[in-house]
Image: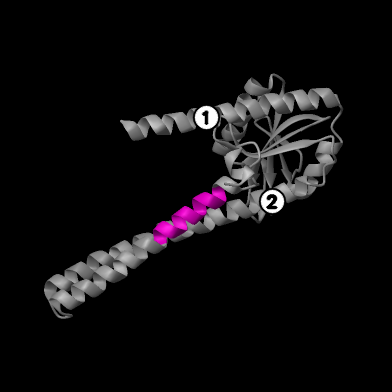
Amino acid sequence: MSHAVSDPTRRAPGQHVRASSQRLRLRTLVVLGAIAIASAAAARALGLQDTIFLAVELVLAFALLGVAHYAIPLVHRRDLGAVGEEYVGSVLTALDERWSVIHDAAIGAGNIDHIVIGPGGVFAVETKARGGNVRVRDVHGATVYQARAHRRALEEIAGCPAEPLLVFSRAWVDRPLARRGGVRVLPARMLVAHLRTRPTVLEPADVQRVRRLIEDGVRAHASARRAARSVTRWR
């Protein structure tokens, strides 16, 4: 097992979404294969003209439509989400050694795509992979609520203020760096510049201390989830 997989503070950008997409893709292929096998078995057992066979084929056709309209688009959306997180992760590599980044961190309020700790403070980065034009005032309230929940959870374990950032990996933002409900909205191309220009609020020792607190919190949450799964399996 790789270090990135075993240590929840060393995960790759988009790791959770990528793995989720791969699992869903495999399940979709299994379902499609089962539909094909069921159709062939029904044809062999009943004959192509049998009314029961036709009824079975109708049921299988509806199942196939369900896969086409739900599972396949969901796989595509998750793939896009993983690509967006991976792209923003690559953008963050431009930060110098004064900054630390934890990717794909679960701390009790869902997965935070990127936690950035540096001289300018602590930031919870939520990535959205949609393209096109984004009006800050039209950002969905659920997205804003999620970003604020990430900030609260992060502040609880870091012991210091954190700023939520909503970063669009591919979209054009009409008012970059404007806030919606207390969450700053910006395109990925402006992320590093924004972080670099923040006033200094953490000294190098503080950055390391806060990172250790966050890492401890992420590991504790991962341990609690593993324990909960173990209990569930033994019930």
- Horizontal and vertical percent for residue 189? 78, 50
Q: Is residue 14 above or below residue 65?
A: above
Q: Which residue is mark 2?
A: 169
Stretch in magenta:
17-28
- Nearer the camera: disc 1 or disc 2: 1
Residue 21 drawn in magenta: yes
Q: Is residue 123 above or below residue 18?
A: above
| Above or below, comparing residue 209 to residue 191 in the picture | above
**Type of the residue with mark 1:** Ser
- What is the secondary structure assignment of the residue under circle 1? helix
The residue lying at 71 percent from left, 47 percent from top is: 89
> Does 11 appear above or below 171?
above
Residue 202 visible in image? no
Q: Residue at x 23, y 70 (%)?
A: 57
**Magenta-span inclusion, residue 215:** no
Give whichever of discs 1 and 2 has the lower sequence position: 2
- Label 2 sits on a secondary structure element that is loop
Q: Nearer the viewer, residue 210 or 68?
A: 210
Q: Position of residue 103 (x, y in %)?
A: 66, 41
Question: Which image quadrant is residue 219 in?
Answer: top right
Front one among 115 and 134:
115
Of residues 218 and 118, the one nearer the viewer is 218
Tell me whether the residue at label 1 lies in contact with that at label 2, contact meaning CB atoms closer than 8 angstroms: no
Label placed on residue 223: 1
Amino acid at pointer 2? Ser
Determine crowd level at label 1: few under 14, some 14-19, many 20+ residues with C-alpha closer than 10 A.
few
Q: Where residue 16 appears, x then y in whole percent? A: 56, 45
**What secondary structure predominates along the stretch shown in magenta?**
helix
Left or right of 53: which side holds 230? right
Q: Report the quarter where the C terminus lies.
A: top left
